[in-house]
Image: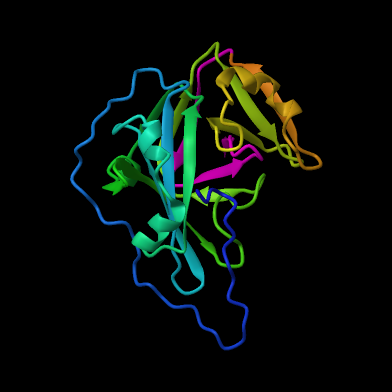
Amino acid sequence: MKKLFLVAIPLLLAVGIMAVAQGNPSIPAVTQTQFLAPRADWRNLRYCEVIPVFRVWFTLPVEVYNTIGLNDCPSDVWAKLEAEQLAKQFNAQVVKLNGPRYWVLNKLIGSGATADGKIVDFGGIQMKLVAKLETNIWQGSVGDLFYTENQVKRNTVFTYNAGNMVYELISPRQEIYRMQSYSQIKDNKLSIDDLEQLGQRLNLPSGWTYQVRVLKNISELKADSLAFVINDDFYNSYQKVLP
């Protein structure tokens, strides 16, 4: 059975037990043989991600791979992936199967390591390395906690066209996080048409609000080496809107 984001990261709390370093853990690269150029408008474009979480002493290096530009995450192959099997295969602490997901932006441009990421293969689905992050073992890894900010290393520009609806979370400190993609992990029938009323279904923490609005002007959401990302309790992903 698939282990999604609800897999706990065990902590080594026993006195005298030392974490074992794994050198520089990573997924081996393969030659790209799958090609599927995304359409011009990415809004409601389907993709999937695989997120292996490694451990090096007391840190958790995390790599994020997705299918954009290679395939549309075929349902029959995706359904056969087993998180525990992949973790054993690649000597990871845990592997998270993150999808299917759908973008709600209109255009995405990646540069640097985000654009040039290596190609890997997960059970017949090729994916590209698009981001890296790192946490400590006592913090857990990305996606384990909802409405909690994660720092993701990537170089991206998300474009949202004028006239399109955007979906945003506002924190108690009035920080705005704009949805980048919605997920079918919790609700496998969730569609873009459901997002306008999603706030009624979210289990928002005290002080948080969900807002929907139509953009009057084109808007760009940039990440220059670092993005601040959170998930809601439906596993939809949002990036902080910086001043």
Left or right of 51: which side holds 71? Answer: left
> How far across and down, in percent of the image, does residue 163 sit?
55, 11
> How far across and down, in percent of the image, does residue 215 sit?
59, 16
Across the whole image, how many numbered discs are drawn on residues? 0
In this view, which residue lies farthest toward the bottom? 16
Looking at the image, is 20 positioned above or below residue 39? below
If the image is split into quadrants, where does the C terminus sit? top right
Q: Which residue is drawn at 20% across and 41% down?
A: 32
Left or right of 192: which side holds 68? Answer: left
Q: What stretch is highlighted in magenta?
A: 216-243
Examine the structure image and report whether residue 158 is included in the region drawn in magenta: no
Left or right of 209: which side holds 227? Answer: left
Looking at the image, is 177 positioned above or below residue 144? above
> How far across and down, in percent of the image, does residue 156 sit?
41, 37
Instruction: Say which of 194 and 76 sits in front.
Output: 76
> How far across and down, in percent of the image, does residue 157 sit?
43, 32
The answer to whether one can see residue 242 in this image is: no
Q: In which quarter of the image is residue 106?
A: top left
The answer to whether one can see residue 170 in this image is: yes
Snapshot colouring: rainbow
Q: Quadrant of residue 170?
A: top right
Examine the structure image and report whether residue 219 is included in the region drawn in magenta: yes
Instruction: Say which of 224 and 210 sits in front.
Output: 210
Q: Which residue is drawn at 49% across and 16% down?
A: 161
Q: Residue at x 38, y 65 (%)?
A: 91
Q: Residue at x 33, y 24 (%)?
A: 38
In this view, which residue lies farthest toward the right? 206
Looking at the image, is 106 positioned above or below residue 240? above
Q: In which quarter of the image is residue 205?
A: top right
